[in-house]
Amino acid sequence: MRIQVINPNTTASMTAKIFDAARAVARPGCEILAVSPAMGPVSIESHYDEALAVPGLLQEIAAGERAGVDGTVIACFGDPGLKAARELARGPVVGIAEAAMHLASMVGTRFTVVTTLARTIGQARHLAEAYGMDRFCANVRACELPVLELEEPGSNARERIVDECRRALAEDGADCIVLGCAGMADLCAHIGSVLQVPVIDGVAAGVQLVESLVTLGLKTSKRGELAHPLPKTMVGLLEGFTLAR
Ligand code: 2AL
């Protein structure tokens, strides 16, 4: 089985970290292909970033289809371009926010999402509602940590995230934690061992869910809304995205 894990931002160190997290949970015989787009923002922490990350992400989805991957994980907590990716892909496509929230709902009764900047709180709340997960979501909290600070070796990011998780347990009534950024994947085990509650990293959750779907022979439905997009001419900068008949 081959699973493509796409980091929708263009920061190579984060893609490498995501690869390590995916590899660590992949079953024997499962090959992980970790990629990031050739164009787009270096980090995704606004709606603008998210919109501009999607074209490069869809290029990687199309490349994965040509390469015949069995399934895909979109490794950014905003789950950018998820439905569009499902239209292009035959295999299952899972976003890390949907994966983490669903798994959290199965190991606890109320989770808090701990995200990077406060401006990303609205998107996490929106996704929880869209996935029907809001009734399990106690709160969404931010550490006011820019995504790329997670890539700086000397930063105090880990301590700040642990502190915010502690507040989530003390003040929100949460019994588990969902990490709100793919760049936090390497911190999951540490935070779990310090806090002694389930801590869910969406990258690991997404890989495991896609593996399960592939093992069960479940692909993206091509009947109705998620059918391949219609042939269409694209103009200007997006000319290369034209879908031929
Ligand atoms: C993310 C993420 O997972 N990747 C990225 O660039 N931004 N999430 C976030 N909450 O900022």
Image (cartoon, rainbow, N blue to C red):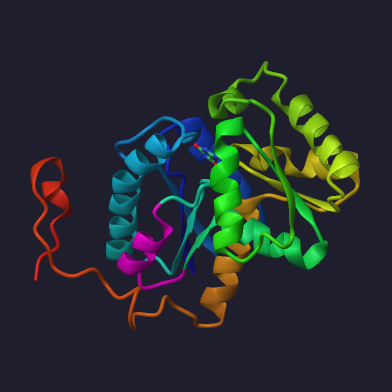
* Residue 83 falls within the magenta-colored stretch: yes
Residue found at the very far top of the displayed protein: 154
Q: In the displayed structure, does residue 67 sit left or right of residue 158?
A: left
Q: In the displayed structure, does residue 147 sit left or right of residue 227?
A: right
Residue 240 location, x and y as percent?
14, 49
Judging depth in this view, the residue of 119 and 3 nearest the camera is 119
**Residue 79 visible somewhere in the drawing:** yes
Q: Quadrant of residue 115?
A: top right
Residue 154 location, x and y as percent?
67, 16
* Residue 151 falls within the magenta-colored stretch: no
Q: In the displayed structure, does residue 64 sit left or right of residue 133?
A: left
Could you tell me which residue is drawn at 33 percent across and 35 percent down? 40
Residue 181 location, x and y as percent?
60, 41
Q: In the displayed structure, does residue 40 sit left or right of residue 126?
A: left
Residue 140 location, x and y as percent?
69, 43
Could you tell me which residue is drawn at 34 percent across and 83 percent down? 223
Magenta segment: 81-92
Q: Quadrant of residue 96?
A: bottom right
Could you tell me which residue is drawn at 65 percent across and 42 percent down? 185
Q: Is residue 181 above or below residue 229?
A: above
Could you tell me which residue is drawn at 65 percent across and 57 percent down? 100
**Residue 29 visible somewhere in the drawing:** no
Judging depth in this view, the residue of 17 and 226 nearest the camera is 226
